[in-house]
Amino acid sequence: MNFRFEEAIQLLARTPASLEAFLSGLPEGWIHCNEGEGTWNAEEVIAHLIEAEISNWIPRIETLLQYGEDQTFPPFDRFAHLETTADTTIERKLAAFRKIRMANLEKLKELVNPEKDLDLRGIHPEFGSVTLSELLSTWVVHDLTHISQITRVMAERYREDVGPWEQYLSVLKARK
Amino acid sequence: MNFRFEEAIQLLARTPASLEAFLSGLPEGWIHCNEGEGTWNAEEVIAHLIEAEISNWIPRIETLLQYGEDQTFPPFDRFAHLETTADTTIERKLAAFRKIRMANLEKLKELVNPEKDLDLRGIHPEFGSVTLSELLSTWVVHDLTHISQITRVMAERYREDVGPWEQYLSVLKARK
């Protein structure tokens, strides 16, 4: 296992500022491009990250710590954010993401004792029994997945424009 | 064509700060993990981005503007940085990348008149005739490719640790 509680937190703490530095103030064309119908643009990805902070990670950690394998994690609707995305700017969403992420990391440090809790188990509604360290590792890789998704969505916009270089740009070969 | 000169510059200008916010101060484990022998860690990717700022983009743009199709672009060694990576920290590399990127964007704005230069052509050593807008689009997608690579390399470290979630995390399915 490579997972380390402190190292995971250090990465999770950096995602909001990194995305803010990358996306804040960028023109429409970059923020609202997507990979075709039914795919997400960068702003929708940020809204999804916020939704996961609200409804996924901490509620699941709390359920696991409180009920163990006696209660299934609360469900998480991966598309819930699509109903609430339209009414703010991406800059506001980025600020909201940073705020809730930082609060959640404080909560995480209060909730979890990494010396003894990481092997505790809970019940995922689909996979069944999972450990706390699997859930926490997933939180980290979920960030990495969505940063990667944002770069892939934005690269798609220039797929034709790069001409013969397309074959050398691996982001244009990434799977959706 | 989706390429817009100003929008491309706005994205290129954000990459260094975004990578600094993400990578600066992260522990060893994140900075030096890779995808196995012969693959790059995050620090090596930053070194490659610096090398491309020095030897690739601006020299090629200058060759294209000065000689058109009469002279092939100077070669770019995509592995040159591997010989010079060991002797500084990632924080120094990130600062060096920011400095040279910002200087190069100033140079770009002096060199190129987007009203009339974008269709000018030069000769790529492998592909033959390419346009300036293809070269500039590639600069942008090259950034996106390497941000994506960094997330993929770091996600690999937790591939086993996420347990059954692996199937839902698209960054773990991305092609190298």
Image (cartoon, coloured by chain):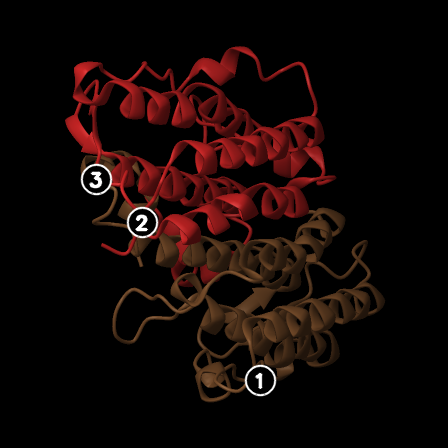
Chain colours: A brown, B red
- The answer to whether residue B176 is seen in the rendering is no
| Dot in front, 1 or 2 | 2
x and y, in percent, of residue B143 in the image: 44, 41
Q: Secondary structure at mark 1?
A: loop
Viewer-nearest residue: B99 or B118: B118
Real-space CA distance between mark 3 and mark 1, rounded to the nearest whole angstrom: 55 Å
Residue at the disc numbered 1: A74
Real-space CA distance between mark 3 and mark 2, rounded to the nearest whole angstrom: 29 Å
> Mark 3–mark 1 contact, CB under 8 Å?
no
- The answer to whether residue A129 is seen in the rendering is yes
Q: Is residue A13 above or below residue B40?
A: below
Horizontally, residue B50 falls left or right of residue A113, namely left
Residue at the disc numbered 3: B119
Q: Secondary structure at mark 3?
A: loop
Q: What's under tag 3, amino acid-wise?
A: Asp
Q: What's under tag 2, amino acid-wise?
A: Ala
Viewer-nearest residue: A59 or A145: A145
- What is the chain letter for disc 1? A
- Please tell me which of labels 1 and 2 falls first in the chain: 1
- Give the class, few, some or many, for how many residues have Cα within 10 Å of label 2's Cα (few <14, many ≥20): some
Viewer-nearest residue: B153 or B119: B119
Residue at the disc numbered 2: A174
